[in-house]
Image: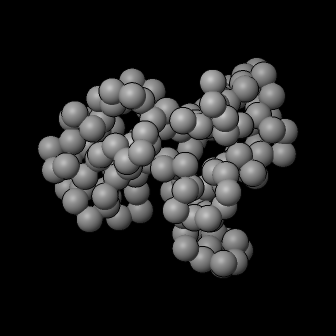
Amino acid sequence: MKRVFVNEEWCLGCHLCEYNCAFANSGMKNMAAALKGKKIFPNIHVNGDDQVHFAVSCRHCEDPLCVKACISGALHIDNGRVCIDKTKCVGCYSCIMVCPYGSLSISQNGTATKCELCLDNACGEPACVSGCPNRAIVYEER
């Protein structure tokens, strides 16, 4: 299965992956209207310091702890990717606490959110990948 991988040595720390992710998941057609002047809630996050930057997103584990910890059944595996049904999430954040990679976060409405590879957004590849100017983020099988 293809997954998102980050080549840390190429990451500039520009945060464009975050903006492209937030826009792709906004449901809007105009990026400025979707994001300008608003707090964004991306499903990928850039961390780092002055020397090293790296993007953190869901690794779609084969045996995900987040799915096991989900008390409401909102997290599930669908064709190899870990997905979240936001209508079932009760906001207990058990999934956030158990993820060893820190890839889940809190959404705009207080439920858990995570990368689902933009497969529902008809981008062809995740928006973070297509929006990375340095190709530090790739979508491939390894």
Left or right: 30 in relation to 22: right
Q: How is the image coloured?
A: one colour
Residue 33 visible to the viewer: yes
Choose between 15 and 81: the one closer to the eye: 81
Choose between 63 and 58: the one closer to the eye: 63
- Where is 28 relative to 90, above or below? below
- Quarter residue 63 falls in: top left
Position of residue 18 measured from the top left corner of the image (x, y, whole percent): 63, 50
Residue 37 visible to the viewer: no
Residue at 76 percent of width and 52 percent of height:
131
Q: How many marks?
A: 0
Q: Which quadrant: the N terminus? A: top right
In the current view of this chain or complex, which residue is farthest to the right?
134
- Quarter residue 8 falls in: top right
Residue at 63 percent of width and 24 percent of height:
142
- Where is 87 relative to 41, above or below? below
Residue at 31 percent of width and 58 percent of height:
85
Position of residue 3 measured from the top left corner of the image (x, y, whole percent): 58, 36
Residue at 71 percent of width and 37 percent of height:
137
Position of residue 120 measured from the top left corner of the image (x, y, whole percent): 52, 62
Choose between 64 and 10: the one closer to the eye: 64
Position of residue 125 measured from the top left corner of the image (x, y, whole percent): 67, 52
